[in-house]
Image (cartoon, coloured by chain):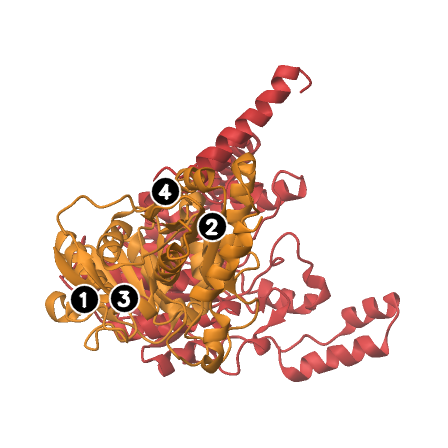
Chain colours: A red, B orange
Amino acid sequence: MSDNAVAENAAESAANPTHEDEVLAELTAPVPEVGDGGPEMVQLLTPEGQRVDNTEYDEYVKDLTDEDLRGFYRDLVLIRRVDAEATALQRQGELGIWASLLGQEAAQVGSGRAMRPQDYAFPTYREHGVAWCRGVDPLNLLGLFRGVNHGGWDPNEKNFHLYTIVIGAQTLHATGYAMGIQRDGDVGTGEEDRDAAVIAYFGDGATAQGDVNESFVYAAVNNAPVVFFCQNNQWAISEPNERQTRIPLYQRARGFGFPGVRVDGNDVLAVYAVTQQALNAARSGQGPTFIEAYTYRMGAHTTSDDPTKYRVSAEVEVWKHRDPIERLKSYLVHEKKADQDFFDAVDAEADELAAHVREGCLSMPDPTGDSMFDHIYVEEHPVVEAERKEFAAYHAGFAEEGGH
Amino acid sequence: MATLTIAKGINNGLRAAMERDPKVVLMGEDIGKLGGVFRVTEGLQKDFGEDRVIDTPLAEAGIVGTAIGLALRGYRPVVEIQFDGFIYPAFDHIISQVAKMRARSLGKVKLPMVIRIPVGGGIGAVEHHSESNEAYFAHTAGLKVVCCSNPEDAYWMIQQAIESDDPVLFYEPKRRYWDKGEVDTDAAPRDLLRANVVREGTDLTLVAYGPMVKTCLQAAEAAESEGKSLEVIDLRSMSPLDLDTLKASAEKTGRVVVVHEAPTFLGMGAELAALLQQECFYHLEAPVMRVGGYNLPYPPSKLEEEFLPDLDRVLDTVDRSLAY
């Protein structure tokens, strides 16, 4: 949205203070200027599902089979269904909060599917689609939103780190991990199953964080095998891109000394291609790349947020026409790479997965009180052990009295 | 037996740890060719290479943040923060990530890392170079916080901190870096987390750590000439506390004075006073008292002698305790 459009909307609200007038203004407001990523944005599928040639990136998708493409579609649909179920569970009081990925499925599936098993992902708290691609059971993600743990999965099982809530902190952890890969000699050997890279996920809001900028410096001077994957979903809660940056985010990379590329984040093929290129470069010892996946947060920041207070519905409508699932479906149908039976089967599978998530969530046991004393330290700790005993004795006292 | 400074004791300890475990890597500003501004890492980059002794960019959040990543990959990073007052850019990573990662993972991962911090004043430095900020970290569950006071402990404690599977903040008394002492590199070292009775006495217990241990020993020496017998305990570990050693001494002498450079308000002395009064109430002849920095921002160096506890202030408080 341009500065002018913001100013116009503000002027309209000021001039029409009543609710009725506000509704009318909303209905009659001109469609705001919504950024389309510009000509520099890499795109292989148009929003209508037309395949467009790209001399630089075509080679990264040329080996994809029809089955691979259907696999992408399945990923996109399933993770959107999981996300919808989690939002519903929050509305029904079963989750304390949920951070929806609605609209960002292609950015996550395209990048997640570009990774090899030995690569490592450092997520924020919204990378449910990446988790899916890494093979993490969606149920694992629900624990922290339900309040039964702070994560709790083994990050080394699927090379998918724990969710990080502090904005941008994980970019430094990812960079350090990549420095470890270098020291292990797992870069540039040419062995497909050995050379490894790291992807650090973050959002447009995080690009303002010192940690993110420091991670760029550390990755650059160490030539670390890390890909910085920024999902620019246009909104940092209520703050638009204009409050975060004065230049396109991908252009920041140049100042740090490594390449930056903007990709259509709603185009799963383009994201897959661009991420492949960046991961290949990292694994082969060419250092970091910054990817800006230009996308849109179709829902609220989290279930606690109310986006109607800061953005107009016309903007959301524009982005609906760029939906990542619809464009891949159009492509698959038009190119006769999938038939109706396939789409029906994926929908049925999505419903089954949602049922699994729902049942798993409802039957997730609450943690026992004394479990909060577990896993604070590796080695036995006198204060933790003393308080554990104190806690047990306190509660045993109630049991003896028979009152509770 | 060898005679070493504290700085050299740490240097030798780091070297021994690096020789023993190839996963030990050092990170920090100017720690390579220069050997650190206090020369604690002198010669180590030459012998172990730039991959294991890493000169980092000047960004402390970056140092600790990337060290977390290295630890997650299976390394044992030992990071140097150049001065106590420069730890704060890394505060978020220490409190929100280092201390909490194990709990967050329900025990699936560990972060065996050491954060070395030269601590305290008395060197005539400019602002931010003389602070004592141990209480911030001792307050945070998930961390261990220790401080050495002599060359032998310096040599052993740094190795024990590196061997610990839990993250350790390792404070080094910067104004004592060049103090010399005997180091027995063969005898079995003391437990990292145990306090040490460095001087036995019967009338009153002085509890200190790091740079104030020497001050307390001097105070005890001076008091002896006046017929007062002071016991001196080197706390060594601020988190967790070795309550058994402290209790035994408090019950024996009945009087405790805690001495540290840090401001007293909510400092280590406050916690020790609370614990000892709770645990040894009937043995105490006087309230547990504190001698510390005043509750002010660290003053310009021309005033630091007035700000920091010294022998006279320690003895003044000892007299007030004995007067009960």
Instruction: Give a yes or no on whether discs 1 and 2 share a subunit.
Output: no
Residue at the image position 34 percent from the left and 64 percent from the top: B173
Question: Does A125 sit left or right of B200 as displayed?
Answer: right
Disc 3 and disc 4 in contact, CB within 8 angstroms = no
N-terminal label among 4 and 2: 2
Q: Is mark 4 on a helix, strand or loop?
A: loop
Indicate the position of residue A264 as horizontal and vertical percent values: 45, 69
Distance between the alpha carbons at the discs numbered 4 and 2: 16 Å
Judged by depth in the image, the label closer to the viewer, 4 or 2, is: 4
Residue type (three-letter) at the residue carrying disc 1: Asp
Judged by depth in the image, the label closer to the viewer, 4 or 1, is: 1
Q: Quadrant of the N terminus of chain A?
A: bottom right
Distance between the alpha carbons at the discs numbered 4 and 1: 28 Å
Indicate the position of residue B244 as horizontal and vertical percent values: 41, 37
**Which disc, if any, is residue A154?**
4
Q: Name the residue under label 3.
A: B27
Distance between the alpha carbons at the discs numbered 1 and 2: 35 Å
**Which disc, if any, is residue A217?**
none
Judged by depth in the image, the label closer to the viewer, 1 or 3, is: 3
Q: Mark 2 points at which residue?
A: A128
* A385, above or below A128, in the image: above
Identify the image quadrant of residue B301: bottom left
Q: Name the residue under label 1.
A: B51
Residue type (three-letter) at the residue carrying disc 2: His
Q: Tag 1, which chain?
A: B
Q: Is residue A50 visible?
A: no
Distance between the alpha carbons at the discs numbered 1 and 3: 10 Å
Disc 1 and disc 3 in contact, CB within 8 angstroms = no
Identify the image quadrant of residue A88: top right
